[in-house]
Image (cartoon, coloured by chain):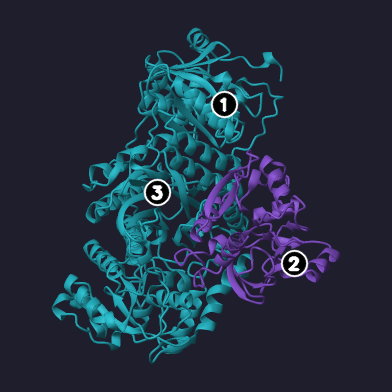
Amino acid sequence: MTENAYQVDTVSRATETPETEQPYAALGVKDDEYARIREILGRRPTSSELAMYSVMWSEHCSYKSSKVHLKQFGEKAPEVDFLLVGPGENAGVVDVGGDLAVTFKIESHNHPSYVEPYQGAATGVGGIVRDILTMGARPVAVLDPLRFGPADAADTHRVLPGVVRGIGGYGNSLGLPNIGGEVVFDACYSGNPLVNALSLGVLKKSEIKLARADGPGNRVVLFGARTGGDGIGGASVLASATFDEDKPSKRPSVQVGDPFMEKVLIECCLEIYAEDLVTGIQDLGAAGLSCATTELAAAGTGGMDVQLDLAPLRDATLVPEEILMSESQERMMAVVTPENLPRFFAICEKWDVIATVIGTVTDSGRLRMTWHGETIVDVDPRTLAHQGPVYERPYHRPEWQDSLQADVPDSARLERPKSGEQLRETVLRMIASPNLADKTWVLEQYDHRVRGNTVLAHGEDSGMLRLSEDGLGIALSTDGNGRYTKLDPYFGAQLALAEAYRNVAATGAKPLAVTDCLNFGSPEDPEVMWQFAEACRGLADACLELGTPVTGGNVSFYNQTGAEAIHPTPIIGVLGVIDDVARRTRSAFETEGEILLLLGETRDEFGGSEWAHVVHGHLGGLPPKLDLERERQLAEILIAGSRDGMLSAAHDLSDGGLVQAIAESCLRGGHGARVVLPSELDLGNIDPGDIDPGNIDPGNIDPFVALFSESAGRAVVAVPRSEELRFTDMCKFRGVPVARIGVVDGDALDVQDQFTIPLDELREAWTGTFPALFG
Amino acid sequence: MPARIGVVTFPGTQDDTDALRAARVVGAEPVPLWHRDPSLHDVDAVILPGGFSYGDYLRCGAIARFSPVMESVIAGAREGLPVLGICNGFQILCESHLLPGALIRNAGTLFINRDVKLRIGSTSTVWTSDYEVGQEILIPIKNGEGKFAADEHTLDELEAEGRIVARYVENPNGSARDIAGIANAAGNVVGLMPHPEHAIEELTGPYPGPATDGLAFFTSVLKQMVNA
């Protein structure tokens, strides 16, 4: 391209040529939004300004459709004393005791991962890790909840292996242990896989960093990777209007990651933090330089002058609009005092990180950018960062919701296994089904050990890390159930929270705080919007009741193909704290002769269940009933049981019900179990008056219901015989039903009077599925 | 004065924290070493830890071997300095020609993180004297390019000279003759694909255990230093 082929659109040119047609619609800017931009500026925007408004006011950056619902997380937030930074920053920060804090957040990278599975998933990890780094923390873990189309679908075999390799390839190269997540299959995710990534970091409470550009005269430094042409969504449209058509601009719209660069950038930043050399810092993620400059300026003194032509480029032909929109990975922006600059640059040099002063903080209240001396941007940064459009999108309950809920999977609607032989076959079929089968094929591709602090990882109810040598640690679990949420968005979101909360407690940690990734279809569909509104309301209500505030998260809309939206899928991450990781509870049955106890009530609940899904391909009815107070009591029992050394194993009951949980605990520990189903046992030492008679009447629970129901608020635990009485007394005191259902014994799963499955046969069914599908 | 074990950090190194911890756990003084600094800071032994030095660009370990610190490590190793290369460190030792052979992409091509059983083949190296020949130990592997390859002559020579430090009981990646680790002729330089530094604590080691089978690599070298 020749120098003359591209004419830069300056502010003075924009003022002189008000009638110039601009391709705003193609950039996703609506008519009224464009009019608003002109009103704010008092002229037409320059093409650079238009590029910035288009990305900053996009759904992804501005939360314009979700804002009115998300604010409940603040309004209904429980009063807690441990929340150091709440929603709105790059990630929430929680006080975990001593001088330590942790920061954690979950994000989606769904669409890029469908287009280019490896790079999409890899840069999803990279992006969330930079958010954590930006808070001043050392990233120490990642978790990846994943959703795919049917396991046997051809496209799943394109997407899943690439996503898994991308997560491993990037996360392993950063030296971050992958300690949890999920792999779930459902036809609703065909064409719209969900690739969510959660990262967690550790920092000293006194060293929290914020994304603000304070102090006129301070320098704005861009450091890390050079800016390239990757990840420019929609910029090709700009190009067609004003750029030379011969230009080689066939660049990927999915960002391409370089984990080595990010690893070096992490170590470089941590060394810079340790010497307290920055007054503010921001990562370059979605909307790249546009977002970093406007957010830093808007949150700080208010003004910034930037010489955009100083940004180091990977491709010298990039024009300002592209540089502003590029989502090239592994870049950071820092605000540094002139006195600290030499030391800042020395550390960057040590790590071979390119750093360039590209601007200065001002008190002008304006974000001004120049390109070779000409002004191309002159805006109030708050209009970009905070004053974007807010939509009260219309929503209504779908007409089909009633008939969906009325389609109850009772024994008249769906045939249930009755004989012992039928139950045995069902157990083997269920445990081999893709959602319940062993995920070792996936998990072996992730490094869960690096940094040497991983106490629990995949296969346990939650991941757990040691934070300090005195034993202080954290636990993390992510959960979500799109089928439950489709049946009832309000309770579906609450059930996801309850499951993650229960999983954290099952390992002995106290649940503290929440991060959420809300994956939905199009907000322009009033029925999807109703699902979203209900899920937010449900989650906010449940967080208030459980005392676990939402600290941050992410909304991913437009997960739909044509009119077909995914099941509404809020993925909830719960963070817990444990004072001594040595007392963690595992899920494996390790000791012969120990007593198995079932905690909680079992009801005939199969709406949205794994059984209805696997055996009948059925989705209807209502999700399991939720009692948040019961969840809280159950969690306290699990935590106290760990603290007082009463528990040898604990496993939450969820997908697949009791028999799935027992089978997993048997297989992990290498010991069998003799199980007596609840229909044949008495209520032990529970006062019958404490029990809701409709729910645990032994006569009403047939073996099928006992084994496969997905009633919430339950766990199975193994206790030494010497602790049984003390433990059951505690349950009775707290009003949580407890039933003795068996003993750890032998090398088979034996359900009395029903069936016996040798562990070898069970293991073969459980572990064979993934290698057969993907190996 | 406790013995000093140095651990080199290259850009892209991941398991330096773990190697430093292993040194501390056995009672040595852990000493971080930096790739650009040619000084070994009077350490008594050096660990080249796992990771992806220089992003594994070109070939695993190919760039790291030219770093200033490696000149000193190579010179020291030739004079008897105990050097243990773990995973990427093993790859660097091969690239440095301190050890023969090469590590190539796993059979099956995937990254594998798994606890594997090893059988100790030699206790006459400074890093394995606390084991017994034939002893089976449980140590994690985690790599994408961990398949040991060498020509038949070299393999025969390694076997004849008793320089195969450990073999996989069940070969996970197609390594020639099940080789998991080898030593130089003098026995002071050992390269190991599995990660003994991830098997040193009950709390974080392989589950179900044994969880601390990796400790003896570090106690072995410590004894050599004390005896020296």
Estimate the x, y position of residue A471 in percent, counting from the top left.
37, 58
- The residue carrying mark 1 is A323
Which numbered disc flags the more N-terminal residue, 3 or 1?
1
A677 and B29: which is toward the camera: B29
Work out whether disc 1 and disc 2 sit on a shared chain: no
Q: Is residue B221 left or right of residue A55?
A: right
Label 3 Cα neighbours within 10 Å, binned few <14 / some 14-19 / many ≥20: many
Quarter of the figure with the N terminus of chain A: top right
Q: Quadrant of residue A92?
A: top left
Please name the color used to draw chain B. Answer: purple
Which of the chains is cyan? A
Q: Label 3 to label 1, Cα distance in Å?
A: 30 Å
Is residue A574 placed above or below A653 in the rendered structure? Answer: above
- The residue carrying mark 2 is B163
Q: Quadrant of residue A768?
A: bottom right
Give the SS element for disc 1: helix
Estimate the x, y position of residue A590 in percent, counting from the top left.
42, 78
Quarter of the figure with the C terminus of chain A: bottom right
Instruction: Tell me, yes or no, whether the two marked residues, 2 and 3, touch with CB atoms within 8 Å.
Output: no
Label disc, if present, on residue A207 of the rendered structure: none
Q: Label 1 to label 2, Cα distance in Å?
A: 56 Å
Amino acid carrying mark 3 in the image: Leu
Q: Could you tell me if residue A26 is visible in this image? A: no
Q: Specify the subunit that label 2 lies on.
A: B
- The residue carrying mark 3 is A518
